[in-house]
Amino acid sequence: GMVDATVVGGSAYKIRLQFADARLRNISVIMLRLNFSGVIVPSAERAIKAATYKIKKIAVISNSICAGFGLESFRWSTWPSQFSDELGYNMYNLSIGGTGYLESPTYISRLPDLAGVDPDVIVFGDHYNDLSQTELDITNAMDATLLSLQINFPNAELVMLGGWLVDENLTDKQKNLDLYVRGLAVANKIKIL
């Protein structure tokens, strides 16, 4: 067979595959950061069966760290955007500065925003806006948030955020909350960032 690829403008490519005979073949088209616009078949007698490929949808509900507070370009500079671009996911960054487990808007109050996305992966959390609250209140709110996500999005992969401050000057409360997040993630078999 023969493969011919030419640039037709910008980041658009025209790729031609030519085979010696009309045997049935499986052809995989994997494209990162480019849109796939289709296949042209020269004869109506030849059938093409497209394989289905679902691009994962990742939704992030967190605070200003994920929202990109202070960055010049929110869309391209946030770590969730860079992360999803690298993995080829569709990103829905629903983060709002000030969000917390107890601080308004709370993660639980943001669940309707997730329903409209129907994400495959949900990255959530970060308790640093809640540090004025008691440890018990924060951990209870963490438990309630995780349970709400598990009930409302049973098919979504959950990823908890925690331990942002890697610093020897953490308070005992911050250390305890980071340990609690890690334990909650392990106990529920979910990933932690």
Image: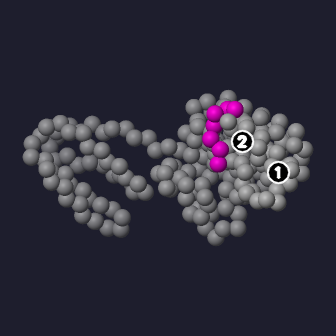
Number of residues whose C-alpha sits closer than 10 Å to that of mark 1, classed few (under 14), some (14–19) or many (20 or more): some
Q: Residue furthest front?
A: 168
Distance (Cα) linking label 1 and label 2: 12 Å
**In the image, which disc is placed on residue 182?**
2
**Residue closer to the observer: 49 or 184:** 184
What residue is at 75 percent from the left and 57 percent from the top? 165
Q: Tell me the kind of residue under disc 1.
A: Gln
What's the coloring here? one colour
For the point 49% across and 55% down, the residue is: 86
Which stretch is magenta? 187-193
In the image, is residue 192 part of the stretch drawn in magenta? Answer: yes
Disc number at residue 45? none
- Which x, y percent locates residue 159? 63, 42
Count how many numbered circles sit on residues in the image. Answer: 2
In the image shown, does 152 or 38 lie closer to the viewer? Answer: 152
The circle drawn on residue 174 is: 1
- Please state the horizontal and vertical placement of residue 142, each as a whole percent of the image: 77, 39
